[in-house]
Image (cartoon, grey):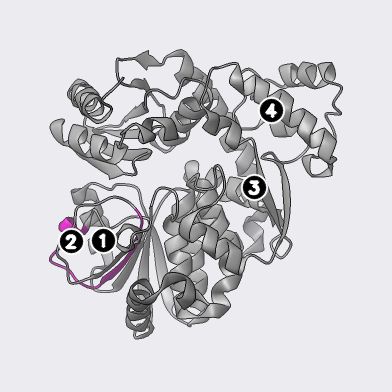
Amino acid sequence: MIYDILGDSLFNILHQAGEKLKEEKYVRVLAHYDGDGVSSSIILLKALERLDIKYHLSYIKNLDNEGFRSLYEEEADSLNIIVDAGSSQIPAIADHSNFIILDHHFYNKTETSCININARDFGINGTRDACGATMAYIFALALDENNRDLFPFFMSGVMADKQDIGGLSGLNKDLYSEYNSYKTHHTLNLEGTISDAITYSIDPFFDGLTGHPDEVKKFLESNGIDPDKNIIDLTTDENKALGNRLALKILENNVGSDAIKYLEGDVLYFDNLGFSSKELNSIIDGNARIGLQSLPVQYFLGDNSAGNDMVANVKIFKTKLIDYIYRAKSDLKEEKYLRYFYAPESEMAGPIAGAIALYTVKPDKPVIGFNSGTDDVKISSRGSRYSVSRGLNLSEVMKTACAAAGGSGGGHDIAAGGVIPKGREKQFLDAANEMIKSQIKIF
């Protein structure tokens, strides 16, 4: 039972939020636009449908106070459920009270009359042990234990937020142990035929193989591996042999151990959905990254007509992202305490930074991605567990450096984002370098 996992304080506030929700006939759901946020929204919308509560879903792309307030006030008179964001944005809507927040990011405590449920306030590590989908799932379970069948979307959010790297921990692990009823297969973190799996692989990213089908063909031939065999059909020995060769390929870039940890993992088979956990994550996150969040939401809420386009979009996203990763890597600027690049699309900056930081460079410095719009510059940053263990906290870096450049930012210690006025990148970089220098004492 969810109460036994959560204990009094967290369960009670979720129950309070649930009772407030049940008084409504209509609610607005505001979800962050990425894979974790979209997974969270699917959980919430399915739970709302089961309560016969009507809803309207909107995605949060602008987390600065002005942009967030503008989005919120479109339906300020309705109960708003804000998921995978919200705690840091409370000051922007402090004069309102009719909202429930389900969040896991760092934030500065702010007095509010709303119901703010942030994992960190209950001693839960929001970087490793709970994501937005975790918070949505426990809320759904507190509403009704029968919502346990929404487990696949909890897992897709965990994977989108990279909280499965190295194995689940904390609340995520507890939920997995209690509610997973699916067949599990420990295998390489790939999907499809071996040839396609490597060619289109982003997590893990194989520098020199990913995006290069001819090189993949040579690699497989030289190792005597059948390119047309499906990953799930590999024997234990074949899986191990291919994994060892791919690990050596990753290690050629002198990257950290986290990159190797993500080479393999437990893949779940969601027979009721027709997708594995790896495929489900790719579908939801891939569509989100090209601005088509609504397709997987439509499909998993029952609109089968969205299925073909939803699946086809995954390769479109991966092809585009792979090209951007190679371009960004070739243009990567090196500073004493960080690396940075410019991304062509704001939704791509985070995945690009993540792939570069994890799979193509040493783990000693965070990677910053800029995307310049008409009036402002959106920023995504990614670090490594190695740097975090030495004191790096990108949430604080982004908050301080963005403020120094006239903007705002925040997030996790290992991954964070922000926005600054156009043309203020140097001020941001100067402040970020100093902040990182102060955090990591021995560099």
State the mark number for residue 93.
Answer: 2
For the question of whether residue 386 can be seen, the reply is yes
Residue at the spot of label 4: 199
Q: Amino acid at mark 1?
A: Tyr
Q: Amino acid at mark 3?
A: Lys
- Mark 3 is surrounded, within 10 Å at the Cα level, by few (under 14), some (14 to 19) or many (20 or more) other residues, namely many
Q: Are marks 4 and 2 in contact (CB under 8 Å)?
A: no
**Would you say 286 lies left or right of 333 here?**
right
Of tags 1 and 2, which is closer to the observer? 2
Numbered disc 2: secondary structure:
helix
* Mark before the other along the chain sequence, 4 or 3: 4
- Mark 2 is surrounded, within 10 Å at the Cα level, by few (under 14), some (14 to 19) or many (20 or more) other residues, namely some
**Residues in magenta?**
90-104
Numbered disc 3: secondary structure:
helix
* Mark before the other along the chain sequence, 1 or 2: 1
Q: Amino acid at mark 4?
A: Thr
Of tags 4 and 1, which is closer to the observer? 4
* Alpha-carbon span between mark 3 and mark 2: 37 Å
* Alpha-carbon span between mark 1 and mark 3: 33 Å
Magenta stretch: includes residue 93: yes
Q: Are marks 1 and 2 in contact (CB under 8 Å)?
A: yes
* Alpha-carbon span between mark 4 and mark 3: 16 Å
Q: Residue at x 36, y 14 (%)?
A: 333
